[in-house]
């Protein structure tokens, strides 16, 4: 487990959000969510994990999906706020400062100027990964200080 | 600009951002529209014996899942289902694919409907989730401030939605009254900045600019900026906007009050009451 500091990818006049970064830095454990029976559809390969911050006891949500032709998206959210968004097997990402992130993998993060990961253009930094579902999850968790404690991936359907 | 120039401009925007690449016997098309993260919206086109199969590569289902809108009763799920029904598209929830099949003999205009639905879903779904957050804040700040002012025994001396001239602009302030605590009449202006909703930074910028402009022309004016982040306390942009309003008060010369803080709210009410009281005495004197 570790924390990746993306400061080097943003211009000097912008800054990381301290509240978000403290949540990312904090030690966390992810486990399979005890889901209630609900009438919900589940896309292939979609998975949801419950992430617990060990000190603050804050509960976050880690969601993963894999689309046709291998695009993997991983979201870490606290309430309605998306803290990190991993894109694996994607194309180029154009950062707001015109710095291109080469394919195939990158992780989005919020800054003061571009804070909404779920709605708008944001910065991302490149990551190395095999690109398969599990290594993408491991890389994402490694960069966000999440220990995969009890993630037996029970919701994987194929 | 001539009609042809405009047509050329719009066409170039569509064409230059439209890309087609071959992929596993089919084609991946990058549309000239971006998804909520700034990446191009893509569709996959697979040739079949009698036509073409278009699908969204699972992006809509993936978005619904990440936004927690994948339950049957969720507004996002309902909206997607209604759209696919209305435009006769197929949403295969097991495969997580939104698709449409077109035969070569058919009218291919359904392709545009497919693209329209796909872009609508990508645009609207993230906004559905945002509304939930805004509702949590309860009553809006201007309603709560109005209630507070109405409770003052001398509320009739407070004018609502008044126009005030600054050095460069005419501004509308939420409340205005005249204070005579120091003998000479002095204008007291109150503006509210509700940082609950969208664009809290713009709201903060607005009140700071207003303060700068209206205080520039008259040093005896008093300006109170009332803001509220209550219900949005974990929302970073609202917190930064509140910090900005606080930080500039000394430099510009207004007083900021956090309406979510009961002590500051009480302090504002007491000060307003205190400033209005001599006015009422003066008024009674006149009546005598």
Image (tube, rainbow, N blue to C red):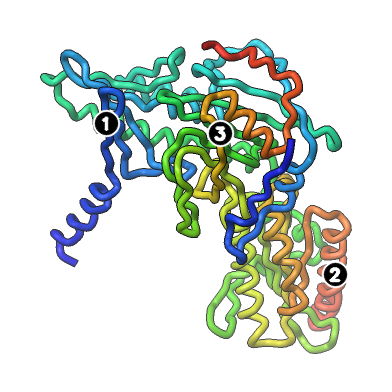
Q: Label 2, on which residue?
A: B271
- Number of residues whose C-alpha sits closer than 10 Å to that of mark 2, classed few (under 14), some (14–19) or many (20 or more): few
Q: Label 1, on which residue?
A: B22
Mark 2, chain letter? B
From mark 2 to mark 3, how far is it between C-alphas? 61 Å
For the C terminus of chain B, the image quarter is bottom right
Q: Nearer the viewer, mark 2 or mark 3?
A: 3
From mark 2 to mark 1, how far is it between C-alphas? 71 Å
- Number of residues whose C-alpha sits closer than 10 Å to that of mark 3, classed few (under 14), some (14–19) or many (20 or more): some
Q: Give the answer, above or below, for where A139 lies relative to B267.
A: above
Q: For the point 66% across and 75% down, which residue is it? A: B211
Could you tell whether B267 is left or right of A48 in the image?
Answer: right
Residue A130: give x, y in percent of width and height: 53, 30
Mark 1, chain letter? B
Query: What is the secondary structure assignment of the residue under circle 2?
Result: helix
Q: Are marks 1 and 3 in contact (CB under 8 Å)?
A: no
């Amino acid at each position: 487990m570790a924390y990746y500091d993306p400061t080097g990818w943003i211009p000097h006049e912008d800054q990381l959000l301290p509240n978000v970064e403290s949540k990312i830095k904090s030690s966390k454990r992810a486990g399979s969510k005890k889901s209630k029976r609900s009438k919900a559809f589940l896309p292939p390969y979609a998975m949801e994990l419950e992430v617990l911050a060990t000190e603050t006891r804050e509960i976050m949500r880690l969601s993963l999906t894999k689309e046709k032709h291998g695009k993997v998206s991983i979201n870490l959210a606290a309430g309605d706020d998306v803290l990190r968004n991993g894109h694996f097997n994607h194309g180029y990402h154009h950062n707001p400062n015109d710095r291109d992130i080469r394919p195939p993998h990158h992780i989005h993060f919020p800054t003061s100027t571009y804070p909404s990961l779920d709605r708008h253009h944001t910065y991302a930094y490149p990551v190395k990964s095999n690109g398969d579902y599990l290594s993408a999850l491991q890389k994402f968790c490694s960069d966000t200080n999440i220990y995969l404690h009890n993630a037996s991936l029970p919701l994987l359907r194929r | 600009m001539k009609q042809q120039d405009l047509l050329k401009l719009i066409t170039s925007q569509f064409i230059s951002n439209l890309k087609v690449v071959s992929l596993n016997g089919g084609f991946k098309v990058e549309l000239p529209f971006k998804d909520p993260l700034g990446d191009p919206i893509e569709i996959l086109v697979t040739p079949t014996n009698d036509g073409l199969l278009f699908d969204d590569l699972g992006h809509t289902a993936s978005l619904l899942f990440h936004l927690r809108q994948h339950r049957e009763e969720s507004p996002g799920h309902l909206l997607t289902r209604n759209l696919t029904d209305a435009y006769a598209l197929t949403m295969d929830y097991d495969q997580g694919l939104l698709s449409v099949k077109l035969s070569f003999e058919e009218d291919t205009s359904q392709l545009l409907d497919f693209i329209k639905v796909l872009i609508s879903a990508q645009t609207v779904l993230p906004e559905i989730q945002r509304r939930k957050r805004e509702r949590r804040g309860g009553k809006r700040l201007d309603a709560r401030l109005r209630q507070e002012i109405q409770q003052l025994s001398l509320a009739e001396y407070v004018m609502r939605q008044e126009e005030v001239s600054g050095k460069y602009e005419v501004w509308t302030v939420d409340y205005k009254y005249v204070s005579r605590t120091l003998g000479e009449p002095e204008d007291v202006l109150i503006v509210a900045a509700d940082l609950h909703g969208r664009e809290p930074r713009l709201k903060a910028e607005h009140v700071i600019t207003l303060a700068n402009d209206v205080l520039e022309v008259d040093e005896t004016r008093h300006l109170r900026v009332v803001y509220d982040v209550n219900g949005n306390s974990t929302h970073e942009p609202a917190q930064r906007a509140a910090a900005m309003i606080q930080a500039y008060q000394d430099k510009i010369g207004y007083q900021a009050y956090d309406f979510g803080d009961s002590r500051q709210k009480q302090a504002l009410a007491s000060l307003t009451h205190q400033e209005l009281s001599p006015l009422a005495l003066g008024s009674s004197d006149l009546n005598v």
